[in-house]
Amino acid sequence: MILSQQDLTALFVTLKLASVSTLVLLIIGTPLAWWLSRSQWRFKYIIEAIIALPLILPPTVLGFYLLISLGPNGPIGGLVAMLDGAPLAFTFTGLVIGSVFYSMPFVVQPLQNAFTAVGQRPLEVAATLRASPLDRFFTIAVPMAKPGFMTASVLGFAHTLGEFGVVLMIGGNIPGSTQVASIAIYDHVEALEYGQAHWLAGSLLLFSFLLLIVVYGANRRYTVAQP
Amino acid sequence: MASNFSVAMKALAVEFEKTTAHHVVLSFGSTGKHYAQIKNGAPFDVFLAADAARPALLENQGIANAGSRTTYARGKLVLWTSKPDVNDVQDILLNSQDVRHLALANPKLSPYGMAAQQAMVELNVWPKLQAKIVRGENIAQTFQFVHSGNAELGFVAYSQVVNPKRSVQGSFWMPPQSLYSPIDQQAVLLNDKQASKDFLKFLDGSLARQIIQNYGYDLP
């Protein structure tokens, strides 16, 4: 076996983290992006700026703040302790929370653009035909924004695959639960195990490339504007 | 150089620049990363590693100057909690029911992590603590895990806990050095520049040795 058991586990944890985070992001991101695309609120740009922050901040900044917030003296950790929950640092759930913050703009921005591109007109027409707001959203906006959902899912997934700094700060490197592929590669390099580092890095490279090929290939068939 | 040495190194650099006309530029990082960078031609003059293995490898490969290897510090391991005034920190380790997470540096990467593992094996607590162990990539990150309170307890370097410029934070227990193999941190020359040689000579001088000891290291 070229990839060790621990490397395979790390790849599995990575895929699981990316899938769960993308799902959570779509659930949170869809209503948020919809609101952003429709709202006339004058301070909307502040929310947009907050969502875009992870694009600029080094992941270590995010990881550092998360580590402190998840700690017993931090706001999230304190709240969890008050509710008698188990602390979140060094757990898979903690990583999902980190990834959701980290990949938020990659999901919300394509969705917001796609919803904006749908425009008012189709929804107004549907309204005159007595479609309820919820009905209009699911039968008009969502299908029309399908390429946006596609882009958002893939970018969210792919960006979480590449996550390193946040996991480094709050993961604790536990095999099977918080040791992701990027960390395992880093460990191999640090331990001078360059052969194993090559195999794992190569697998991740190939997988990411194939993923993007599929997406860009599929996206060609749609005509809606690129985000 | 090794990140565990950063605080001491800054103090040393100030003294070195005072006593010579040279100027020092410091690059902190993990020993494994610096090893890879030096092997691939990074323009460093002197390499202060966290262990003896990587400088020896560079010497064997002819990248570092033969015979320039010297132990500049011997690290001391401490079991540390960020809570102040804990009387018996060792007892928390031995009776670890209330410990949710015990942090150590990855034994594969860090000599301090390896020492922590050896000490726990010697104390017969290594198997039973497995499920509670979280691993930092290096000793600085391990320190942060404990400092932020996310891990109740952790093995860190004494040099991180003690600092001549401020009081000790939290509480610690220093395991006897018989529980782990010596953490010899070695330095090597990477070229023949006079400044590099002067620095290694300075590092071996009495002033530097005093500073190194003040910052929590032993000397061989």
Image: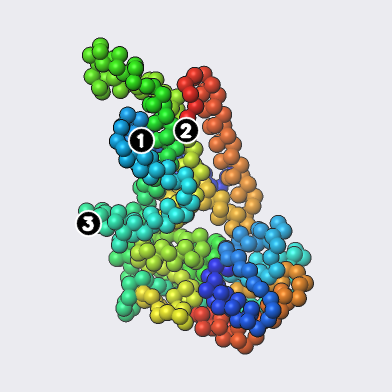
The Cα–Cα distance between marks 1 and 2, rounded to whole angstroms, is: 14 Å
Q: What subunit carries mark 2?
A: A
Q: Which residue is mark 2?
A: A154
Callout 2: SS: helix
A187 or A215: which is nearer to us?
Answer: A215
The Cα–Cα distance between marks 2 and 3, rounded to whole angstroms, is: 36 Å
Residues marked 1 and 2, same chain: yes
Tell me which amino acid carries mark 1: Gly
Q: Which residue is mark 3?
A: A82
Contact check, label 1 and label 3, Cβ < 8 Å: no
Image check: B205 left or right of B61? left
As drawn, which residue projects farthest toward the top? Answer: A129
| The quarter of the displayed image where residue A26 is located | top left
Tell me which amino acid carries mark 3: Met
A2 or B4: which is nearer to us?
Answer: B4
Q: Which residue is mark 1?
A: A29
Tell me what residue is drawn at x 46 percent, y 70 percent. B156
